[in-house]
Image: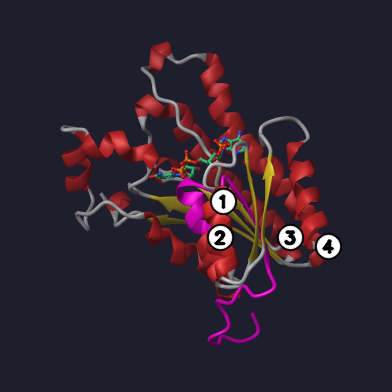
């Protein structure tokens, strides 16, 4: 970034790929990026949320496209990146958001469930980052934003494959940031705390865990998805060009305790 001014947060003319970007937290990332001027390409298996998102992004004055693709299958990353290039001619921002969580007692965990979680949360993120990095290196600029979790730092024992995958995402973010810095590509992440989404609905209403979680959060409040929009725009924009290898907690201070 040569200078800082009120355009430093602008994403005008940029192209963003958001995995799982039509619903859940991904939808909010897609909207935030389009609000600041980016065209958005979304990939997920189903089209849930797509029609509504398309309307919002187009109202923001930006273009949006969708590809139905399971990103865990072999060759998916190259196919997705190719589709973005065919549609928009370049790729400036990759948001590795698609993720899943499976919960079980430690001795009952099935090998297949471990593989499913690692394949989506870690392997698919890496393969997409790798394919995107080749395009971004040619462009001599790019932003890769990996979605971690408080489980990038903590150890949820009933969701240990999820914790392992999100620790892996932290490691990938740091090592990849170092490796890609000479190509002017920044690699960072967001670690959302307890956010009110479908994934956390059961926890919010759990008579024991609900109040326990709330008591642990220094701000005393669960986060809403909108809290992640500002940090996402910051990491996607040139305002953060000297920030790399960081996994930014957006958790109301949960990790402080
Ligand atoms: P959701 O379950 O609501 O959304 C997941 C998204 O990923 C969906 O769009 C889904 O679409 C897509 N997806 C899942 N599997 C695949 C696949 N194989 N190929 C392509 N797309 C896929 O999750 P959240 O919005 O709650 O979470 C998003 C991210 O944020 C995850 O990485 C999660 O770990 C992280 N996170 C969430 C927190 C929360 O409080 N919700 C807290 C901390 C981190 P489809 O099913 O159509 O493929």
The percent position of residue 41, horizontal first and vertical second, equals: 67, 55
* Viewer-proximal residue among 249 and 91: 91
Horizontally, residue 17 falls left or right of residue 114, namely right
Could you say which disc has been placed on residue 138 in the image?
4
| Local secondary structure at mark 4 | helix
Q: Which residue corresponds to mark 1? A: 51
Measured Cα–Cα span from mark 3 to mark 1 = 23 Å
Measured Cα–Cα span from mark 2 to mark 1 = 6 Å
Instruction: Say whether disc 1 or disc 4 marks the residue closer to the N-terminus.
Output: 1
Other-residue count near label 1 (Cα within 10 Å), few / some / many at <14 / 14–19 / ≥20: few
Instruction: Say whether disc 2 or disc 3 marks the residue closer to the N-terminus.
Output: 2
| Local secondary structure at mark 2 | helix
| Local secondary structure at mark 3 | loop
The percent position of residue 45, horizontal first and vertical second, equals: 62, 36
For residue 117, what is the image quadrant?
top right
Which SS does the magenta portion mostly show? loop
Q: Residue at x 74, y 37 (%)?
A: 76
* Viewer-proximal residue among 28 and 58: 58
Instruction: Say whether disc 3 or disc 1 marks the residue closer to the N-terminus.
Output: 1
Could you say which disc has been placed on residue 55 in the image?
2
Q: Are marks 2 and 1 in contact (CB under 8 Å)?
A: yes
């Amino acid at each position: 970034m040569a200078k800082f001014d009120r355009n430093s947060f602008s994403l005008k003319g940029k192209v963003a790929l958001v995995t799982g970007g039509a619903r859940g937290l991904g939808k909010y990332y897609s909207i935030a990026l389009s609000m600041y001027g980016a065209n958005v390409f979304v990939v997920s298996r189903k089209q849930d949320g797509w029609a509504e998102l398309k309307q919002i992004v187009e109202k923001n004055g930006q273009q949006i496209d969708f590809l139905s693709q399971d990103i865990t299958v072999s060759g998916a990353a190259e196919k997705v990146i190719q589709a973005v290039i065919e549609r928009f001619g370049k790729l400036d921002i990759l948001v590795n958001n698609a993720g899943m969580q499976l919960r079980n007692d430690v001795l009952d965990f099935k090998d297949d469930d471990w593989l499913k979680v690692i394949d989506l949360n870690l392997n698919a993120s890496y393969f997409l980052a790798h394919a995107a990095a080749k395009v971004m290196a040619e462009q001599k600029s790019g932003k890769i934003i990996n979605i971690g979790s408080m489980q990038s730092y903590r150890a949820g024992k009933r969701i240990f494959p999820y914790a392992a995958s999100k620790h892996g995402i932290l490691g990938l973010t740091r090592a990849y940031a170092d490796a890609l810095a000479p190509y002017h590509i920044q690699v960072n992440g967001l670690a959302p705390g307890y956010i009110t989404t479908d994934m956390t609905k059961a926890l919010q209403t759990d008579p024991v865990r609900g109040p326990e979680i709330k008591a642990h959060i220094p701000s005393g409040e669960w986060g809403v998805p909108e809290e992640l929009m500002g940090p996402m725009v910051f990491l996607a924009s040139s305002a953060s060009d000297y920030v790399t290898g960081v996994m930014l907690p957006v958790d109301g201070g949960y990790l402080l305790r």
